[in-house]
Image (spheres, coloured by chain):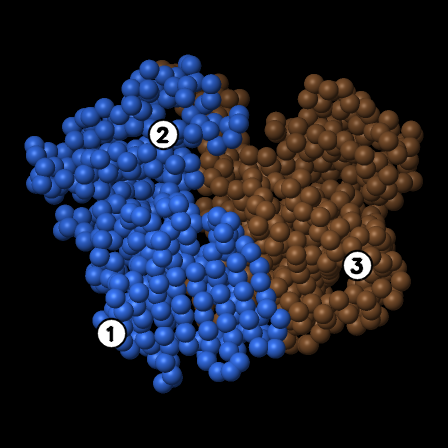
Chain colours: A brown, B blue
């Protein structure tokens, strides 16, 4: 369910005027941190430039770092210039934008600070017309989430100022918990203060145009959905690969690991979009219901035959883009005997009528051969080769590849006769790329998601049941790996496609990872 | 652009007699030579999301359009067919030339190439334009007709082409007589609204979109929203270029849009001297609403966006303004509502150039009902 402009405004009628949210104040906890400077403020600046933010929109940055309003505005103006992913930053718009920024220095572990915040919010309501609408963004380390949420509740800031007329929402950054137990605790803490319709669990991956296009591709085209099932599909591969290592985030990574950092959220979200049934409408409740059904249908990992389903890896030193790079255990703030995984490959099954016996192979890792996120759907081979046994090995199964990044697009491989007097068959590729067909620059994931959040559209945000279901699947695996320590950990050379065991995972099923 | 010899000659564009068979063969050769080019550093890809027909009435305009098309295809890959209809020129006949435009969307990517077909008709041969053009439209993709001939008054020989067209793009800023030409356009829009599925876009209307957005946003906050029904006075000022770029049509469109959305009924017009210094009077629920226009000279020959000041009745009154800032490409908005501090901000208000506007319009294959209603009211408004 989305807000319109809240008030009746006949000037807003018509397709050509874009929807802008009702005036509101956004409170960023962790405003002196990296996420605020790199992503949030540049995204808000571009929304401002594109006239997608309402007049009076205001940001209150909150953190312990002692800043004045002016100092914070200066720092954020610098951040826009430094981290802007788009070509132009113009001074008049930037000057106007930073005037909407305010800062509160305080210890947000102390409930008294929230009274001060409440006063500033009320002041902005009367001075800038933010109408009592509040968006709280938790850009802090996860350990601070419970205390901030509890204090917001304690001073009454979690409830809409004027029920029915104004709204209050909270945005929570991943990771949503550390394991099943902590996720449930966080859900309980958040749930004791906010209703689920106020909670926006942000996974920036879902804000990417190509991830959203997955639904359009599947449900706005008549030709794919009839064959999107076990009868025609042999298997599905989802790869989210990075060239980068931990890049100075060794301390965080030691606690998180790849499974928590990538698989529990990004990869599982993509899996559910690939496998879900058609929702009746593109509505937050319906889309998220269907995603949750997929998560519920995933078969629990078989711990008696773990090696047949899961590979855990860690990068050793190697070469990436012509540069020698260190192994994970040589990175700063990483234990020299760390058993934290930087690579994981999983074979999952979805126990429902659509997907029975269709394996879903997932892999994600750091320091892999290249940065690429792609979904590969391999169709079954033709049941009978009419062109004779000589051509049999030349006929490749059809493959549909959906590239999420980079070079976003969709490609289909099919077989064609090679021009020759004899029957020669070769696979050919039909390809669509966003940049080539549509040109222009798509909005960044944060622009999309921040705007959705202000408009009250939860479709691209993760619901509590999806979070819990993902943890239910993965938490036992994390427990097992913790018990095992380095036992079973596979090392792989940086710049490769992961450990050999990852290839073996598919080879056992007479399959192989598609070359990306 | 690294292309082979044959491809190069084709991209140069050589005049050929226009028959469908010849054109199709040329198109086929064009792509084959591109694919076989051993010297190409980047593989060539053909992309198309629509067919863009362009109608112009002389060769010079056709050549000028070709230059613009190359910028359009980077945003909207398409097959472009430029129709040059010179009804009064001789010798009579249909000729054509084909060329390709390629660009690299990103470093290391493939070249994206699009076809451009020019069909030039002279004398009575203009009646054969549809026979050549219609079969060349890419099947199953939307067809846009960019009207490059000023006032929209399609001759009868374009009837069949209009029937395969999904959307017509006109630019009322190029109308020589904005008032009568807009009224003519309104009649055509009405004519095609029924059985034919032809939608209309006006680039001049698209130029107004940022301004309309800012006006709408003025009334999004609670205290201001209640004043929307009480607007009593609107002043529109704009900068006029030394030559062309008439904004009078734009001012009329903006007025008609406000009138349709806010339920104003046109009453009368008061002309005070110069054509663009006049007042239109409306009524809403028996109360008068005045719209005043004032054109001023553009500084540096560059047109600026419309400046809009809106006031309400009553005391104290509310006032809303969208004023172009000195800094090029920005607008300053200010809302003064009784009991509230003034609310101000500066945002970007880039006025897109013609190619930018065409690119934006090509992304909308649907009808713009608000535009249609606006144009219809505008026709009534001008009769008042």
**CA–CA distance between discs 2 and 1?**
49 Å
Residue A124: percent from left, percent from top: 69, 67
Residue A271: percent from left, percent from top: 65, 46
Residue under label 2? B101
Judge if badges 2 and 1 mark residues of a common chain: yes
Residue B280: percent from left, percent from top: 31, 72
Residue nearest the viewer, comparing A307 with B219: B219
Judge if badges 3 and 1 mark residues of a common chain: no
A231 vs A194: above or below: above
Tell me which residue sits at (39%, 61%) in the image.
B237
A232 vs A320: above or below: below
Q: Earlier in the sequence, mark 2 or mark 1?
A: 2
Mark identifier at residue B384: 1
Local SS, label 1: loop
Residue nearest the viewer, comparing A205 with B262: B262
Q: Callout 1 environment at 10 Å: few (<14), some (14 to 19), or many (20+)?
A: some
B334 vs A508: above or below: below
Chain of the residue under label 3: A
Mark identifier at residue B204: none
Mark identifier at residue A104: 3
Please name which of the two marks, 2 or 1, marks the residue nearer to the observer: 1
| Count of numbered circles on the image | 3
Local SS, label 3: strand
**CA–CA distance between discs 3 and 1?**
58 Å
Residue A28: percent from left, percent from top: 74, 56
């Amino acid at each position: 369910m989305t807000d319109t402009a809240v008030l009746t405004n006949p000037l807003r009628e018509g397709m050509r005027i874009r929807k802008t949210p009702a005036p509101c104040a956004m409170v960023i906890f962790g405003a002196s941190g990296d996420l605020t400077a790199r992503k949030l403020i540049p995204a808000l600046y571009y929304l401002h430039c594109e006239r997608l933010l309402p007049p009076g929109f205001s940001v209150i940055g909150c953190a312990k770092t002692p800043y004045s309003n002016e100092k914070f505005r200066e720092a954020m103006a610098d951040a826009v210039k430094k981290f802007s992913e788009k070509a132009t930053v113009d001074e008049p718009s930037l000057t106007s934008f930073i005037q909407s920024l305010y800062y509160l220095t305080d210890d947000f572990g102390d409930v008294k600070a929230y009274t001060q915040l409440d006063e500033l919010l009320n002041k902005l309501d009367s001075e800038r017309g933010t109408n009592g609408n509040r968006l709280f963004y938790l850009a802090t380390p996860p350990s601070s989430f419970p205390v901030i949420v509890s204090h917001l509740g304690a001073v009454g800031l979690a409830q809409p100022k004027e029920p029915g007329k104004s709204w209050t929402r909270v945005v929570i950054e991943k990771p949503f918990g550390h394991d099943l137990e902590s996720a449930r605790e966080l859900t309980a803490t958040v749930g004791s203060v906010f209703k689920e319709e106020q909670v926006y669990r942000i996974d920036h991956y879902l804000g990417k145009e190509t991830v959203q296009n997955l639904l359009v591709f599947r449900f706005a085209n008549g030709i794919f959905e009839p064959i999107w099932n076990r009868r025609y599909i042999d298997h599905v591969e989802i790869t989210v690969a990075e060239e980068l290592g931990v890049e100075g985030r060794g301390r965080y990574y030691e606690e998180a690991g790849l499974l928590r950092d990538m698989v529990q959220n990004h990869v599982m979200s993509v899996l559910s979009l690939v496998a879900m049934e058609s929702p009746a409408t593109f509505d937050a409740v319906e889309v998220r219901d269907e995603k949750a059904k997929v998560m519920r249908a995933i078969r629990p990992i078989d711990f008696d035959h773990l090696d047949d389903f899961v590979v855990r890896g860690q990068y050793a030193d190697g070469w990436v883009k012509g540069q020698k790079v260190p192994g994970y255990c040589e990175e700063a703030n990483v234990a020299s005997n760390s058993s934290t995984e930087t690579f994981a490959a999983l074979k999952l099954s979805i126990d429902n009528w659509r997907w029975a016996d269709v394996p879903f192979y997932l892999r994600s890792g750091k320091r892999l051969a290249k940065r690429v996120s792609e979904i590969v759907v391999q169709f079954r081979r033709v049941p009978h080769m009419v062109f004779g046994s000589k051509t049999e090995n030349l006929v490749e199964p059809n493959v549909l590849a959906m590239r999420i990044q980079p070079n976003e697009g969709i490609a289909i491989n099919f077989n064609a006769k090679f021009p020759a007097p004899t029957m020669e068959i070769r696979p050919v590729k039909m390809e669509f790329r966003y940049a080539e067909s549509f040109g222009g620059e798509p909005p960044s994931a944060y622009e999309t998601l921040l705007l959705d959040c202000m408009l009250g559209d939860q479709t691209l945000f993760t619901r509590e049941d999806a979070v819990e279901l993902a943890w239910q699947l993965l938490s036992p695996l994390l427990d097992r790996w913790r018990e095992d320590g380095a036992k079973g950990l596979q090392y792989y050379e940086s710049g490769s496609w992961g450990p050999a065991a990852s290839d073996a995972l598919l080879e056992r099923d007479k399959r192989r990872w598609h070359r990306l | 652009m690294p292309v082979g010899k044959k491809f190069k000659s084709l991209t140069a564009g050589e005049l050929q007699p226009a028959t469908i068979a010849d054109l199709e063969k040329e198109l086929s050769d064009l792509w084959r030579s591109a694919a076989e080019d051993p010297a190409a550093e980047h593989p060539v890809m053909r992309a198309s999301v629509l067919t863009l027909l362009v109608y112009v009435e002389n060769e010079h305009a056709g050549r000028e359009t070709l230059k613009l098309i190359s910028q359009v295809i980077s945003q909207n890959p398409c097959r472009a067919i430029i129709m040059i209809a010179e009804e009064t020129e001789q010798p009579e006949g249909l000729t054509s030339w084909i060329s390709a435009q390629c660009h690299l969307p990103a470093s290391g990517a493939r070249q994206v190439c699009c076809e451009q077909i020019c069909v030039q008709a002279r004398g009575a041969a203009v009646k054969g334009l549809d026979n050549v053009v219609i079969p060349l439209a890419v099947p199953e993709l939307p067809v846009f007709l960019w009207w490059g001939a000023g006032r929209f008054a399609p001759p009868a020989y374009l009837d069949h082409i209009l029937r395969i067209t999904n959307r017509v793009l006109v630019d009322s800023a190029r109308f020589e007589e904005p008032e009568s030409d807009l009224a003519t356009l309104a009649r055509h829009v009405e004519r095609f609204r029924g059985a034919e599925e032809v939608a209309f876009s006006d680039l001049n209307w698209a130029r107004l979109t940022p301004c309309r957005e800012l006006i709408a946003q003025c009334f999004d906050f609670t205290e201001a929203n209640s004043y929307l029904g009480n607007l009593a006075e609107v002043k529109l000022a704009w900068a006029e270029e030394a030559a062309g770029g008439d904004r009078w049509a734009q001012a009329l469109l903006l007025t008609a849009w406000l009138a349709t959305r806010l339920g104003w009924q046109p009453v009368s017009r008061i002309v005070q001297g110069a054509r663009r210094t006049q007042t239109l009077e409306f009524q809403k629920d028996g109360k008068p609403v005045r719209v005043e226009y004032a054109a001023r000279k553009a500084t540096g020959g560059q047109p600026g966006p419309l400046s809009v000041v809106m006031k309400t009745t009553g005391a104290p009154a509310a006032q809303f303004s969208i004023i172009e800032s000195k800094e090029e490409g920005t607008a300053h908005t200010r809302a003064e509502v009784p009991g509230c501090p003034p609310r101000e901000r500066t945002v970007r208000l880039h006025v897109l150039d013609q190619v930018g506007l065409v690119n934006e319009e090509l992304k909308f294959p649907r009808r713009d009902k608000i535009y249609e209603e606006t144009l219809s009211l505008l026709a009534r408004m001008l009769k008042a």
